[in-house]
Image (cartoon, grey):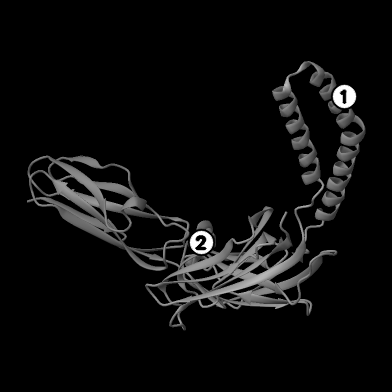
Amino acid sequence: MAVNATFQPPHVSSPPGAAAALTLQLHNDAEINQVVTLKALGQLADRTVLQSQTVHLDAGEHFDVPVIVDVGSTLAAGAHTSAIEILAGEGPAITAEATIDVEESSSYTVALTPERSVSALVGRHRIVVENQGNVPIMVELLAESLTDTSVPELAAPMLNVDPGVTAKVELKIHPRTRFWRGATTEHPFAVQVIGNDATVHDLTGVYEQGPRVRPWLLPALVGMLGALAIGTLAWFFLLKPNVESIAEDKAEEANAADQARLDEKIAELEQAAADARALPLGTPADLRLNAEASPGGSATESFTVANDRVLSVTDVVFQNPGGAVGRVALIRSGEVLLESELANFRDLDFHFVAPFRFDGGDTVEIRVDCDTAGPTESTCIVGALIIGFVDEAR
């Protein structure tokens, strides 16, 4: 004879987020005392709490062990089995099972992050859907511009979100026109999230489009010019006379070698002042490079800066419209300046406080290493829009 075990009740229902109470009834029908060891099994083992894991049973004794099962808020709706392994002495282990029916609960939240974006090229936002219930949900996403000055682009119009999962969808706001300078322009937009339970969530946001040339650039240039003018005047009317006077006094006492070194130093200071008066900017310019590579291969396209010009690159936009997988790099005369994974973006823009400088004769090159073409493409087609200023070489 051995120990018998049954659950009472054998079948219960529970809402999500509650605790299901069961009773494990033990009966020692042997003629000797038994030491019984209990262990939770199955998919609910981590959620099961036994009042006691070891029970001492006298011969013929009945004993009830309370069993609590934590039914989490995201545990999938439907029938789940709570199983307890019972081991008594050296006999074989037995298993007692009870069924817990978890009731359905649909609960989710939606949010737009950030609610306001700032960029000169494109506004980037995300719609975040968090499924806090225990059944899968499906939502439809609709985005519209509240003006005729921009166009919204959703990465996916539908979402299926499993219980306990948070899903994110990228939303881009493309301005219809771009501008180099002037006041910022606001592009308000709205997003409607419609759940399969017919619940509608309305979200609103704003993309703030700024000029390609930053508003602080002109005041900074004016301040730079003022500082250069003051420095130049201070040099010619204060520093240079003193330096020359000192040079003349020292020349009377120095030998020819000392005089030569002093003259060379004065020439270096004058050249530094002359160089400081030159601004590093020039005429706004833009350049587009396109490269197309077959899967498993590479391709490049380049542009060579004229010998009498200097190109200062302030903005770079990589474009991967076909959804190719691989890498793209911006290269200056063989030197890699930027490198990005194509699988991470459709449009990727960079804006620099200090520009990349390409001197006369330097090459501006993009290189595409193609792993896999996009879903509807046979090759990896990648472009790069390069924006900056061109000035005469000095």
Labelled pair 2, 1 in contact (Cβ < 8 Å) = no
Residue located 41% across and 77% down the image:
294
Estimate the x, y position of residue 80 in percent, counting from the top left.
34, 64
Secondary structure at badge 2 equals strand
Q: Is residue 210 left or right of residue 361?
A: right
Residue found at x 80% / y 41%: 273
Residue at the top extreme of this rendering:
253
Three-letter amino acid code at the position of disc 2: Ser
Left or right of 169? Residue 273 is right
- In this orientation, which residue lies closer to the viewer: 152 or 211? 211
Q: Which residue is mark 1?
A: 245
- For badge 1, the amino acid type reads Ser
292 above or below 282? below
> How many angstroms separate mark 2 from mark 1 (CA)?
58 Å
Instruction: Check disc 1 and report its element: helix, strand or loop.
Output: helix
Choose top left, top right, bottom left or bottom right for residue 89: top left
Quadrant of residue 31 in the image? top left
Seen in the picture, residue 85 relative to 240 is either above or below; the reply is below
> Which numbered circle lies on residue 340?
2
Above or below 221: residue 323: below
At which x and y percent is residue 132? 52, 62
Decide if residue 319 is on the left or right side of residue 235. Answer: left
Residue 351 lies, in percent from the top left, at 67, 58
